[in-house]
Image (cartoon, rainbow, N blue to C red):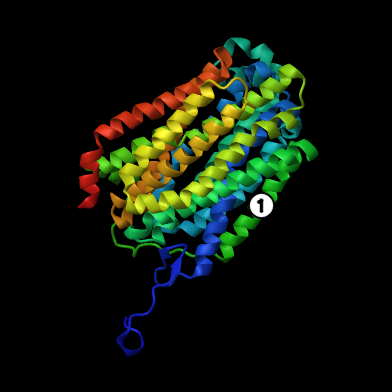
Amino acid sequence: MDGIDGVAPKEMKFAGIAMPAGISKANFTFLFINTFLMGMFMTVPSVIQPALMSDVVGIDQSFAGSINSFLQNMSQVATLALVAAVGALSDRLGRKRLVFAGFVMAGACYFMFGNAGAIAARLGIPNGAAGRICAALSFMPGRAAEFAPFAPGLLVSYAARLLIGVALILGYPQLIAMWGDYSSGKDRGKAMAMYGTGVGLAAIIVFGVFGGILRRSGVVSAIMSIVALAAVGGLVALAFQKDHMPEKTAERHRFREILPLLRGSRALRASYICAMVTRADIIVLGTYLVAWGVKAASDSGMAAGTATMLATIPMMIEGGVALVAFPIIGMLTDRWGRVQTILATVLSGGVGMCLLAFAPTPFSPVCFLAAALIGIGQAGSFAGSNALAIDASPKAMMGAVLGGVNTMQPIGVLLFLGLGGYLFDKVSPGSAFLLKGGASLAFLAWFFVARKPIIEEIRK
């Protein structure tokens, strides 16, 4: 509509993103706040799990790699099973309702996680049966007797992590979709960068603050802080977030309907493969770097809380670099191109993982450089692959398509944590990072060969 004297009204923007009709800066601000909070819930297990397993559950550190890998994988199993269906459901029910439910469930499940030992004792879970179950789940059925002393608390921890995974998929995929709903094609890279900035800022806070809380007050206090933040996130979602979804049609889109899109779109397939390979980076980094630190502390007599704080320094660097990189990557994604940005940043992340493989200790300066490279890789591969997927998807099916993208993450995580945990315990901590870095570089080679048809497709 023209303004006074036929002059078009000035376009309103938030962080360079043109604001659609009916959406205010306050709506963008509260979306960013909940992106930040959900990012904390996604990141904090990497920090608290090794200390929780050591100080509260009391695991044998010779099983640290396998146990921490399986804890992370419990969340990924939930994601793999449900995230695509939840994405399609959000297209019909709305994003806001699911985000609210995710925060409420996350708070309850983190409380359960922090009190796993007490809950196991209250339920009277027998050590022998729990030992057999936990040993089997950790792919060590012949060592059930060694698991038995700490197995009841570990079994409850496994269940809690599975439920935390369900809570997360109710939340973060809907927040990604909301950033897509709030942006047009020309601003999509910047919108994905804003999501990544919120998550990156959350990582800095988690690795910077929660390591200190662990050292001073213990792991249970850290978890209770997360429970309180979940209540804040639920309140923001319920009272201040606003859906801005495509106009509903009589046709209902289901997850299976994206399969023909995948067959017909090289760009969409590339986005899915990129997500599968690269989105495991931050989980692999956090899981094994902190577990390596706690394991090294056990061998040297250092307190687990102190080791956790030291091992999280590279994670803080990774989060800080990603935070700075996301706005730059967002502009590059829109101006330089999705494909070119993905190529450059996947190279950075792959080299960073390979550097970690040869670091002498988890506290080495080599880890700092590697973490910085991984931070650049995280920003570019996330923003680029999401923008690529949204470009290739019909607007009304965005939630289902992004649900499919998010399904690729747990497939990759299950693979890299499953094999990586075995390599961590049986070969060396560095071998888990080498596996991940090699996979990223292999994807890079394939994507480089396929780049021209993908560029032509998204230009149409």
Can residue 275 be seen by looking at this rendering? Answer: no
Nearer-the-camera pick, 260 or 10: 10
Residue 13: x and y, percent?
44, 68
Nearer-the-camera pick, 255 or 289: 289
Residue 210: x and y, percent?
69, 41
Q: Is residue 19 above or below residue 80?
A: below
Residue 211: x and y, percent?
70, 38
Residue at image location 57% in from the left, 27% down from the top: 366
Q: In the rendered image, which quarter is residue 415 located in?
A: top left
Residue at image location 46% in from the left, 34% down from the top: 410
Q: In the rendered image, which quarter is residue 453 located in?
A: top left
142 sits left or right of 95 in the view:
right
Residue at image location 68% in from the left, 48% down from the top: 227
355 sits left or right of 129 in the view:
left
Amino acid found under the numbered disc labelled 1? Leu
Task: Look at mark 1 in the image and give the residue it sits on.
Answer: 229
In what element is the residue under mark 1?
helix
Residue at image location 48% in from the left, 52% down from the top: 195
Residue 118: x and y, percent?
76, 33
Q: Residues within 10 Å of mark 1 (few under 14, many from 20)?
A: some
Q: How many marks?
A: 1
Nearer-the-camera pick, 372 or 93: 372
